[in-house]
Amino acid sequence: MLTKRQIVDFLEEKDEVVIEALFRQADQVRKKYVGDAVHLRGLIEFSNYCKRDCLYCGLRRSNENVVRYRMTIPEIFNTALEARNLGLQTVVLQSGEDPHFTIDDLCSLVRSIKTDIGFAVTLSIGERTYEDYKRLKDAGADRYLLRFETTDPVLFKKLKPDSVYEKRFRCLEWLAELGYQVGSGIMVGLPGQTMESIADDVLKFKEIDLDMVGLGPYISHPNTPLQGSENGTLDMVLRVTALTRIVTKNAHMPATTATGTIDAEGRQKALQCGANVLMPNSTPRKYREHYLIYLDKICIDEEPHKCRFCVESMVIGLGRTISSDAGHSLKSASC
Ligand code: SAM
Ligand code: SF4
Ligand code: FES
């Protein structure tokens, strides 16, 4: 197990030979613990309304330049159906924190996707009550993604002024307790983030024994208070990816869209130093340009089938295979 000091040293390392060796080691750990198959999860961004005001995010409620949309429940269901027709086996339903959707609506959606389509369902809809999480689990939801964004409580408070640090972690505890496969993660390169706090983040992934860890660069958005701040770098995202793989061993780790946004080869590189999941965008094309959490997001002009086959060729190009199963957690407690 790496210590905090060792992780900081790798994050600050100047010698490329050492970093190349780190990436190789992460790739070997990935191969040993999660194999060569890459899991595909179709991402449906079903609403860009958000009641929160996170400083980094283009969907924050104070951004009046966003054209807001919300898909209807039948529309979301049909989009999931289309994802099945494209050979996917699981969807991630993501949105801003949109109070418009009642828990009854969401439960019936989850139930119909589970029973009529047979998909594994992942939710990424932010902070909710214990009761809501329980009802969604009872309706059949399998997994939940809720990034804690940073373990630094001061930075968290600054960047998420209307969220409570302890509540975010409490939500992650509730989700695990309720039997969800739990994913969390961070943005790398947040303004004010230190190498020490990233090292704490990596150790936190292990401590809370996550089933999934999502990492991507922070990318600035012009209509936010952080406009003009520097983006996270690919180099740093790859280092954190490699260190997370080495520390967590068998967590599922996506090569994220944000990583593909800062570098055309970003996702391929992430897959070569620890990542084992891709999330092709399955959102109908007409909505994509409005789900701009950051600037220059990729896949805005593509249809779902284009992204589906694009990621497949990416995987084949790396000599890897597409997983033939739903890609459930590899942690013993959830299996
Ligand atoms: N609203 C839910 C939440 O915040 O958990 C889910 C949707 S939110 C758009 C999903 C993730 O987008 C966040 O957890 C955050 O890490 C990421 N994100 C937001 N703004 C970003 C930015 N400017 N650059 C990179 N990632 C960003
Ligand atoms: Fe809303 Fe999530 Fe964006 Fe924060 S990160 S403003 S909660 S969509
Ligand atoms: Fe969307 Fe490549 S994944 S075009």
Image (cartoon, grey):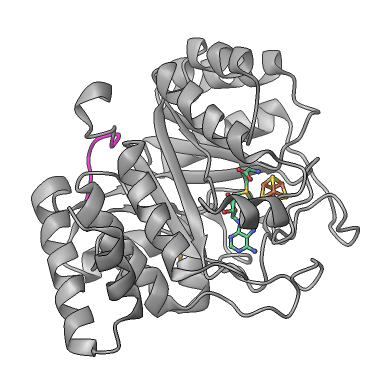
Quadrant location of the C terminus in the rendered image: top left
Q: Main secondary structure of the magenta part?
A: loop
Q: Is residue 254 visible?
A: no
Q: Is residue 270 above or below residue 132?
A: below
Q: Quadrant of residue 208?
A: top left
In the rendered image of this protein, does residue 68 appear above or below residue 12?
Answer: above
Q: Reply yes or no: does residue 112 show up in magenta.
A: no
Asked if residue 217 can be seen in this view, the reply is: yes
Q: Nearer the viewer, residue 16 or 92?
A: 16
The structure residue drawn at horizontal position 25% and vertical position 47%, both measured from the top left corner, is: 248
In the rendered structure, the answer to whether residue 20 lies left or right of residue 167 reads left
| Between 131 and 86, the one nearer to me in the picture | 131
Using the image, determine if residue 19 lies above or below residue 285: below
Q: Image height check: is 47 above or below 299? A: above
Counting from the top left corner in percent of width and height, residue 28 is at 10, 61
The residue lying at 57 percent from left, 11 percent from top is 135
Q: Residue at x 54, y 28 (%)?
A: 170
Foreground of the two, 208 or 241: 208
Q: Position of residue 85 (x, y in %)?
A: 43, 39
Q: How many marks?
A: 0
Q: Write the start and end of the magenta stretch as one range.
A: 322-327
Report whether 273 appears left or right of 146. left
